[in-house]
Image: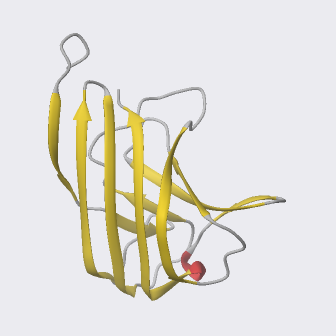
Amino acid sequence: VGREVPVTETGTWTPSITFGSGSTGIAYSYQEGVYTRTGDVVHASCIFQLSDKGSDTGDAVITGLPFLAKSASSDIFVAAFGRCANLSGLTSGIEGAILNGTSTIRLNDVGATGSSNLNNTHFTNTSILRFSATYKIQ
């Protein structure tokens, strides 16, 4: 699996967003991602822009990471957002928590008094997200 003799691999992946686990009507102007895997460490980057945020409601989750994240005692891996545009109602920067044992990222608005999950109301039909994440895999 690349742990004994490190495997180096590069490739592409397609990021998607869901609201409340649904993606009804979501459309993209563009969505692209790249990754490099060395042994059990993956560095993934991507950018996407919505052209329609669709009709589903609920928490915002990015799906499609190229590999499942390693399970740990908590969600210790995060995505760093370099560009966020055309969003609504945020109080601070976005944090992306890579969920244990999954290929998904939960989006949070993290402020001085705590954090809350982003949901469909924070997005517009032209929202743009660009981020990078480095995480360990199973």
Residue at 32%, 61% (x, y): give it.
46
Q: Residue furthest front?
A: 82
Residue at 49%, 37% (x, y): give it.
100
Q: Residue furthest right?
A: 113
Horizontal relation, residue 58 to residue 109: left or right: left
Q: Quadrant of residue 126?
A: bottom left
Q: Residue furthest top?
A: 4
Residue at 40%, 84% (x, y): give it.
54
| x then y, percent, for residue 18 | 42, 68
Q: Quadrant of residue 117?
A: bottom right
| Depth order, front residue of 28/102 | 28
The C terminus appears in which quarter of the rendering? top left
| x then y, percent, for residue 95 | 58, 57
Look at the image and name its color scheme.
Answer: secondary structure
Q: How many marks?
A: 0
The N terminus appears in which quarter of the rendering? top left
Horizontal relation, residue 91 to residue 44: left or right: right
| Depth order, front residue of 133/98 | 133
Residue at 33%, 42% (x, y): give it.
43
| Depth order, front residue of 18/65 | 65
